[in-house]
Amino acid sequence: MKANLSLHQKVNAIIIITFTAIATAIVLIWMPLQQEHIQSDMNQFTMVMKTLVERDHDALASEIFDERYPAIQLRLQQMVTIQGIEQIMIYDNQGKWLAAVGKAPSMEPLSIQEKQLAQEGMRINQDVSGEEMLIFYQKIEVIGELVGFIRIDHSLKHVQEEFQEAVMLIIILLFMIFCIMLTFFNWMLFRIILSPIKYLQNTMKRMQSGEIGEQIQITTYDEIGELLQAYNQMSMELQIRQQQLETRSSELLEIKEKLEEKVEERTSNLLQTKNYLNNIINSMPSLLIGVDTEGKITEWNSKAEEVTGISTQKAEGEMLSHIFPPLSNHMKIIQQALLQKTPHKIEKIQNLLEQANTYYEMIIFPLIADNVEGAVIRIDDITMRIQLEEIMVQTEKMMSVGGLAAGMAHEINNPLSVIMQSLQNITRLISPKYPKNQETAQKYGIQLEQMEAYLQEKQILTLIKGMQETSVRAAKIIQDMLQFSRQSNSQKTPVDLVKLIDTTIQLASTDFDLQKNYDFRRIKIIRDFVPNLPKIFCVITEIQQVILNLLRNAAQAMYDPENLLENGPSIILRVQQEQGMIRIEVGDNGPGMEEKVRKRIFEPFFTTKPVGVGTGLGLSVSYFIITTNHRGQINVESRPGQGTTFIIHLPVR
């Protein structure tokens, strides 16, 4: 927070800052000069001590060498009389104390550091009383041989006193300059600036209280005078503007009232529009979810609440991956749509809401208008559409091969009829039962009974019988193909579907063949029929054919040697009414089928059975009967290891 200082305080602050800068400059100039003066004094002291030692050097060296300690003591007393020298000490060449004069001399030997200082010359140290001393060291040598050391302590008290006096003088001088500057500048400030500004301030306070138009008398024509003149001009203009504002104020009040009415009207319209849009969003059968660029939810419609069980208040503002975990695997595509600003579609998402055999479609619409960032995600249940598409694909396949089946059936039927007729003639012509055959045989000396025995022994008659059975089977295939390829003209009659299914089960129970490896009578049949069902209009034989085909396929699948069931085979049949149609379910607990097999199950000639066992037309013909002849629907649900269920929808009328 800035300090609220007056102009007087700001000027004083400037004076203090200016004085501080000047004082700092003076001190910075004075300090080197003072240091130079002190250094000069110390050099002078050093020169005096060097001269003193050089004067008595030879005498001291001789006395130390001869160990004349009284003479050394006397000489040191003469040397200490020089002003400033506090004490002198003599040591031998090993640093051992020999003699000393002065105040409280130390008798301790020289340290290694002091021996090194004897080569450098001097150092500054403090004594016990705290007084700074200049300590001078020098070696005493005779003909290049070291005989001892001399230490002279010179007091720096005089130098310190001179420095303190100089500092006090500078401080007093600077204080006097500061007082003079402060007094002079404050007087000039009050006379030239503060007095006119104070008058202007009082006038502006009166203007603030409502006295607009007051003029100030101008007595000076400097910058302050220009300021006062500008104020007078402003005061006049404000007076004129006030009158204009009062005139326009009443006009603005009227405009304000009109604008408030329009704002209320627009607000009401916006609320109605918002409610209308919310109703549209919440009425849609799709899940609508709005997200921002970070993946946080901004919109959550009623369908999303219904499907997830999470309210809008709880969902908004939360991460989409946290609130709706099934979409976690698709967050990269959502982010990609946001970055590219283009819609993205994900089709056939299976089991998004943990519901089996369901498909969903998700479309991400990025928001690109009015610089709004985010996206709207629409999720639709397309399970019915996928099923219809599969049915349409199957229908197209049925239609595409219809003509081919008819042509092939007619082309095969002609030579097959010749083969069947020829086999029948061969059997009749070699039979001894006919007199004509006996007459012809006797003519050529042939006994038909012996020839028949020969043919029996060589199993030629068995081969002919097998050829006849195979031809009959081929004729049945052709009949199924023709049935598949043309519209049925059979008459539809009202039928009790429950009785029809019971009759078909009885027919299937007689289906027993060792070559087929199953016995229908050993299969557990479970009936789940809703009572009082309405009769449906259908061709009895065709519906029986479809049901019988489904029962046989279920029986063969459950008796597959590779898929033997632990709990025994069972087939469940359900019949119920559903949305104006009859729903028939034929389910088994067999091995089920893979997805690629399920998609092709209604294709003609497609079979999973070994060659020679199935033709691949049973389910395709059943599909044709239900969808084309009876305008119904048939589809299959199956997973490996979970059995298979065929679902048929037939219209009541």
Image (cartoon, helix red, strand yellow):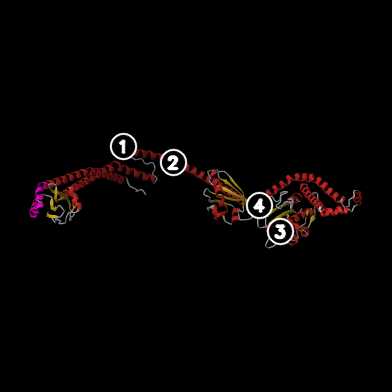
Horizontal side of 217 relative to 619 (left or right) equals left
In terms of secondary structure, where does tag 1 sit? loop
State the CA–CA distance, disc 1 to disc 4.
101 Å
For badge 1, the amino acid type reads Asp
- Image coordinates of residue 166 in percent, x first then y, are 18, 46
The reply to whether dot 2 and dot 3 touch (C-beta < 8 Å) is: no
Residue 220 in the magenta stretch? The answer is no
Q: Name, please, the residue furthest toward the front.
A: 445
The residue identified by callout 2 is 243
The span shown in magenta is 54-75
- Image coordinates of residue 29 in percent, x first then y, are 23, 42
In terms of secondary structure, where does tag 4 sit? helix
For badge 2, the amino acid type reads Gln
State the CA–CA distance, disc 1 to disc 3.
121 Å
For badge 4, the amino acid type reads Glu
Q: Could you tell which of marks 3 and 4 lies nearer the N-terminus?
A: 3
Residue 559 tag number:
3
Residue 222 tag number:
1
Q: Which one is in front in this view, the residue at disc 2 or the one at disc 4?
A: 4
State the CA–CA distance, disc 2 to disc 3.
108 Å
- Image coordinates of residue 465 in percent, x first then y, are 81, 53
